[in-house]
Image: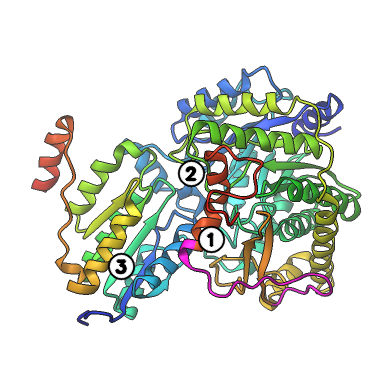
């Protein structure tokens, strides 16, 4: 037997259909239910989402309710603060085997959120000790590691089919080389498994280059098979998480390209962005449109491997395996190993300002538009891994890299590596 | 500290407590440095009392609050309140995406100006206007800046007069 999420995913996999999922959360209970109901009513395989609000993320369970009472909209559902019976009523008739629901939250200290989702009758969430601490919180990594360990044990102790997705494949959302994303999500998967979680998903955020992305997801699947043989896992892909195209055509094409990437690399689930992403928190209607667009785009024939894919595969595999092995060699306890790895700079997230991240690494775009290491700091790479140190990055250069994908798609050049400025 | 031509100014860069975004802070740190600032970047999810402590410690010529998670309006108000409570007067500007909808921009800018912000940079040309502001501050000091007053929509006119009256 398995839980709603695993069964739903396994069923879609058998039918070779991509499962899509929005990123959606509303502060008001009725609005949240209406949004979930509209997603539930779609005639495509879809998982529902309750994204919690930013106050709840930082453990402030008072401001969310005060802001709602003051008539403001929240950017998510305050699952800890709303009365539990109201949340259960909100879910009634929607949540079930045909409509799994995941709670997305972004908290470094997740126990309260996980207690609340369990009390609401749910069992599926996401995050991780690194991926929800370093990019999202000021808390010491060590605290997040122990809180996540406790929360994993709580979840699997309270429900039969607790499922956690590692957010390690996203980190800061853009400008991170694929090997670190893959190593991080596999390491978080190992951490979850060490604390009793038997059902999980591993993540990867679409990057800047099609061949590199396809190679990266294949590396992730190979390493997951190798390192996590005794748990049930699937791969969730995120539509590009960085600066999003501002034109409807550009945004739609980017959503489609993420769906095709998912299809070509056998990702089971896709977290979809919307065309209004560049401007505001999307409406339910915009989410529904994006889910339909993504589901349809995944239906076409798969694309064969591009010419550079093998080269990218070898490079990403070498780096990701090196990172995972170095970390696991530090300590038999994965949480302790992760903490120590960041202290030593063996793991170091580019541009991450958290005090426990050394912030000595950088990421750049090469002349193909692919993600490469700039400065590798103290990362344990040897041999063929090259450093492309670009010296001190100017703000305009950083902005150009952050804006690279949006620019390409807004100017109708999704497959062109060189942009208008001739540099790319 | 007076600010003369070509001299660096000290800038404390922060966000609000509920906002975990980094890219705006990483970009602005470089941008402000390139425009003459010595920047202390407080990173994501910054509590208001930490901002007050750092203002006391670093003695900046300018405080910059950047937020893009849709809750920056409230968070910036909290920072302004805490600074007032601590008896601190420092030129303070805010910018980014401060509410969940861009249609709020004029109202939010008006209200934050009335609460003591030196200026508020929102919308399409925010970064160009911010650059002009920094250039002005380097020459004349940030406190001398006069923000252009936001256009008040007719249906908001009554609310605006009330908030000014407060």
- How has the structure been colored for display? rainbow
Q: Quadrant of residue B41?
A: bottom left
**Magenta part of the protein: which range?**
A378-396
Describe the element under mark 3 as helix, strand or loop: strand
Q: Which residue is mark 1?
A: A137
| Whether residue A288 is situated above or below residue A342 in the rendered picture | above
Q: Which residue is mark 2?
A: A53
Return the x and y of residue A87 as percentages of the image width and height.
Answer: 54, 31
Q: Nearer the viewer, residue A76 or B139?
A: B139
Q: Quadrant of residue B154?
A: top left
In the image, is residue A96 part of the stretch drawn in magenta? Answer: no
Circle count: 3
Q: Label for residue B63? A: 3
Return the x and y of residue A240 as percentages of the image width and height.
Answer: 62, 44
Return the x and y of residue A392 as percentages of the image width and height.
Answer: 53, 74
From the image, state whether disc 1 or disc 3 is nearer to you: 3
Q: Quadrant of residue B105?
A: top left
């Amino acid at each position: 037997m398995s839980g709603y999420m695993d069964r739903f995913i396994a069923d879609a996999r058998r039918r070779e259909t991509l499962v899509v999922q929005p990123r959606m959360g509303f502060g008001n209970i009725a609005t949240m239910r209406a949004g979930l109901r509209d997603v539930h009513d779609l005639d495509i395989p879809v998982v529902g989402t309750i994204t919690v609000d930013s106050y709840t993320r930082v453990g402030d369970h008072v401001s969310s309710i005060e802001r709602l009472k003051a008539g403001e909209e929240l950017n998510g559902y305050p699952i800890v603060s709303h009365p539990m019976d109201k949340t259960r009523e909100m879910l009634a008739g929607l949540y079930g085997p045909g409509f799994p629901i995941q709670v997305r939250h972004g908290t470094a200290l997740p126990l309260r959120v996980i207690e609340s989702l369990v009390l609401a009758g749910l069992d599926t969430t996401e995050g991780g000790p690194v991926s929800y601490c370093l990019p999202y919180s000021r808390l010491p990594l060590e605290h997040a590691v122990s809180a996540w360990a406790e929360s994993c044990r709580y979840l699997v102790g309270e429900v039969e089919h607790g499922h956690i997705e590692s957010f390690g494949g996203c980190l800061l959302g853009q400008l991170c080389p694929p090997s670190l994303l893959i190593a991080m999500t596999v390491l978080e998967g190992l951490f979850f498994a060490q604390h009793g979680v038997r059902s999980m998903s591993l993540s990867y955020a679409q990057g800047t280059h099609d061949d590199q992305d396809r190679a990266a997801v294949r590396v992730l699947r190979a390493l997951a098979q190798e390192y996590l043989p005794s748990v049930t896992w699937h791969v969730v892909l995120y539509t590009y998480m960085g600066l999003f195209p501002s034109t409807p055509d550009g945004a739609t094409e980017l959503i489609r390209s993420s769906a095709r990437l998912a299809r070509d690399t056998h990702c089971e689930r896709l977290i979809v962005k919307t065309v209004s992403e560049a401007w505001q928190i999307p409406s339910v209607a915009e989410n529904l449109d994006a889910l339909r667009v993504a589901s349809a785009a995944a239906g076409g024939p798969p694309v064969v491997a591009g010419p550079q894919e093998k080269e990218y595969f070898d490079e990403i595999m070498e780096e990701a395996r090196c990172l995972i092995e170095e970390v696991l060699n530090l300590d038999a306890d994965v949480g302790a190993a992760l903490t120590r790895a960041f202290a030593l700079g063996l793991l170091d997230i580019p541009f991450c300002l958290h005090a426990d991240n050394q912030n000595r690494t950088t990421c750049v775009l090469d002349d193909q538009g692919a993600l490469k290491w700039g400065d590798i700091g103290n990362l344990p790479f040897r041999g063929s891994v090259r450093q492309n140190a670009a010296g001190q990055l100017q703000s305009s250069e950083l902005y150009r890299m952050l804006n690279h994908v949006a620019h390409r798609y807004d100017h109708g050049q999704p497959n062109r590596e060189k942009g208008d400025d001739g540099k790319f | 500290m007076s600010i003369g031509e070509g001299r660096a100014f000290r800038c404390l860069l922060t966000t609000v407590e509920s906002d975990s975004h980094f890219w705006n802070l990483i970009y602005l740190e470089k941008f402000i440095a390139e425009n003459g600032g010595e920047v202390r970047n407080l990173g994501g999810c910054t509590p208001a009392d930490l901002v007050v402590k750092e203002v006391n410690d670093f003695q900046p010529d300018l405080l910059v609050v950047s937020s893009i998670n849709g809750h920056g309006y409230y968070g910036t108000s909290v920072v302004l309140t805490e600074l007032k409570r601590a008896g601190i007067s420092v030129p303070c500007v805010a910018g980014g995406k401060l509410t969940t909808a861009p249609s709020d921009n004029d109202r939010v800018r008006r209200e934050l100006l009335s609460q003591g912000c030196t200026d508020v940079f929102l919308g399409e040309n925010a970064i160009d206007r911010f650059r002009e502001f920094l250039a002005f501050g380097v020459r004349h000091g940030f406190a001398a800046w006069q923000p252009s007053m936001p256009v008040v929509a007719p249906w908001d006119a009554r609310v605006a007069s009330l908030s000014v009256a407060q």
